[in-house]
Image (cartoon, rainbow, N blue to C red):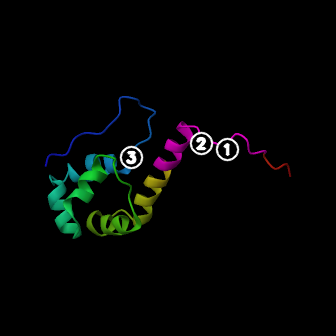
Amino acid sequence: MAMEKIMSDDPLAPVHPGEILLEEFIRPHGLTAGRVAARMKIARPRIEKLVRGRTPVTVDTALRLERLFGPSAQFWLNLQTRYDLETAKAAPIAGIEAIEPLRV
């Protein structure tokens, strides 16, 4: 299955770690989702969903990406955490505005 580009037209939109995986690691190495999945010993749909931004980087995936491509598992998890925070801040979360900050 071909991997589609998931980049947003909005330059300030949060960047999903799957986009970084696709653009900075998979394509430059001339790989496919199937080949990456096979080398990582996981199912192909897991990588396909990740590069499409439909699933997060898990600890297991981060460890496998570290082993395959080199950047640390922490690198991959930091990308995911940043994406999650930016996405959460962009959409109002019920009840957060009602929290009165503690004054110390």
Query: Mark 2 or mark 3: which is in front?
Result: 2
Helix, strand, or loop for circle 2?
A: loop
Q: Are marks 2 and 1 in contact (CB under 8 Å)?
A: yes
Query: The disc labelled 2 sits on which kind of residue?
Result: Ile
Query: The disc labelled 3 sits on which kind of residue?
Result: His
User: Reading the chain from its start, which is encountered first: label 3 or label 1?
Assistant: 3
Which residue: 45% across, 64% down? 74
Vertical side of 44 occupied by 7: above or below: above
Quarter where residue 36 is shown: bottom left
Alpha carbon distance from label 2 to label 1: 6 Å
Farthest residue, direction right:
104
The numbered disc on residue 16 is 3
Helix, strand, or loop for circle 3?
A: loop
Residue 84 located within the stretch drawn in magenta? yes
Alpha carbon distance from label 3 to label 1: 24 Å
Helix, strand, or loop for circle 1?
A: loop
> How far across and how far down the image is residue 16, in percent?
38, 46
Which residue is the site of mark 2?
93
Q: Is disc 3 surrounded by few (<14), some (14 to 19) or many (20+) residues within 10 Å?
A: many
Which residue is the site of mark 1?
96
- What's the magenta region? 83-100
User: Horizontally, is 76 left or right of 34 in the view?
Assistant: right
User: Horizontally, is 88 left or right of 55 in the view?
Assistant: right
Which residue: 25% across, 39% down? 5
